[in-house]
Amino acid sequence: MENKKRKVLIAGASIAGPVLAYWLSKFGFEVSIVERAPSLRLGGQSIDVNGPARRVAEWMGILDAIKAANTGEVGTQWVDKNNEVTASFPKEGAASLTQELEIVRGDLVEILYNLTKNDVEYLFDDQIESLEQDEQEARVHFARGHSGSYDLVIAADGIRSKTRKLMFGDEPEFRYLGMCTAYLTIEKAETDTDWARWYTADDSRVLLLRPDRQGTTRASINFLLPEEEYHKLEKADHKPLLLERLDGCGWEAPRLAREVEKSDDLYFDGIGQIKAPKWSAGRFAMVGDAACCPSPVSGKGATLAIVGAYILGGELARHADYRDGLKAYESLMRPYAESVQDLPPGVPRLAYPKTALGVSIVNTVMGVIASDAVQKVAGLFSKSDPEEEMTMDGKPLPEYGMLAPGNVS
Ligand SMILES: Cc1cc2nc3c(=O)[nH]c(=O)nc-3n(C[C@H](O)[C@H](O)[C@H](O)COP(=O)(O)OP(=O)(O)OC[C@H]3O[C@@H](n4cnc5c(N)ncnc54)[C@H](O)[C@@H]3O)c2cc1C
């Protein structure tokens, strides 16, 4: 292993970026993170830290902080337009959508920032404008006018990664899944409980309201939109389109429309996946959503970001030559990422019926699935070994603790 401290620049201070920074700095690298936003972006709904990501969180010593920040969600209820519950999936049930380690995305971002801020240089309100590389180094020019030299530059700036485009051009593909989603934080109302409430309207629309521990409510508005219409959307179209889709939805849509109008915390995007034929090119590489976004419908975006960042950090530490480290990272991580991206047939379309009859079928089917009898049978088949769950589809996570100068595992 080289004696000189290797310098790494990471773009993106959300989940993948800080997890990678944590491990790299533990392994003796000098790490900087450049974040385009002026401060941490704390928006978004609950995300799950499950499977192998839970094990990585345990090794990072943040499991208790994640548990303490639990949203308190007790399960998910399907409701009809009168807010009558048509199906209940309690957290502890076999078919629950609520995971044990459910945390609001922004809380996890803060935990990771606090864990790394003393060892990692954070550059907010800046981004990479151009980069080049040769045998000796990667040179980066920042939007704020300064430049720097690094051994490696890693894109961890999400599904829309601009850094990825600078590194790989148009080769990585954004595969649109035919659906748009908006997330926003709204005032808590009397109807909000500790349950997530899922409402299916006709015309392929779904509204979801979830509790948080901040005393507000996390809303998401979801609808199918044909690809040609999606590609024509500009930022200025987002709010008008959401208001149009909320119109005539029923249930609590008027409340959501008022919140959309006044929101300055709106996150709107097409749901899609990133398919990239390679994750590195010389001294450039990518991780998290930038490399292999599985889409929020997979429920595993944060898991892939955490596990991918851990393996990338570990493999770079384990190999003296960064080329070997990047190769090992991709060969360990890609099969797992591809299996997560492999969504069941009909997802997400099946959950978005077009007609009122379709809505009532979805509600009836969910009611049957939630019934005691079905839950008991499902429980018989879904009992799994907790150790097995913390693997990557049966493949154990590599352990890198012994590589660190200090005791990290
Ligand atoms: C504001 C926000 C809200 C979200 N809400 C949800 C949600 O409710 N549910 C869900 O499943 N997923 C949500 N996501 C996506 C989720 O965080 C990711 O799917 C997953 O956790 C993987 O994280 P990541 O670190 O790879 O990417 P992301 O979480 O997308 O983070 C990318 C980071 O890079 C920064 N960035 C962007 N461009 C640049 C640039 N050019 N230079 C430097 N930095 C840049 C962004 O500001 C962000 O901090 C949200 C993401 C964001 C940014």
Image (cartoon, rainbow, N blue to C red):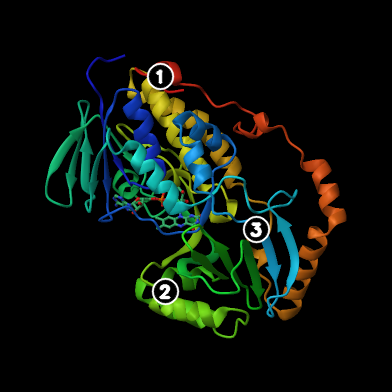
Task: Name the residue located 56 percent from the left edge and 63 percent from the top edge.
Answer: 210
Above or below 53: residue 26: above
Residue located beneath label 3 in the image? 347
**Between discs 3 and 2, the one toward the N terminus:** 2
> Which of label 3 and label 2 is nearer to you?
2
- Of 59 and 395, which appears nearest the observer? 59
Mark 1 residue type: Asn
Q: Position of residue 58 (x, y in %)?
A: 51, 32
Q: Please say if the residues under marks 3 and 1 sit with CB atoms less than 8 Å apart.
A: no
Depth check: give the residue in front, 130 or 3: 3
Q: Kindly report which numbered mark, 3 or 1, lies closer to the viewer in this rendering.
A: 1
The quadrant of the picture occupied by the N terminus is top left
Q: Please, is residue 398 above or below residue 138 in the view?
A: above
Residue 408 figure quarter: top left
Q: Amino acid at mark 2?
A: His
What separation in Å lies between label 3 and label 2 (alpha carbons)? 24 Å
Percent position (x, y) of residue 271? Answer: 51, 60
> To which quarter of the image does residue 269 belong?
bottom left
Q: Of helix, strand and loop, which one carries label 2?
A: helix
In the drawing, what numbered circle is on residue 407?
1
Are the residues at dot 3 and dot 2 in contact (C-beta closer than 8 Å)?
Answer: no
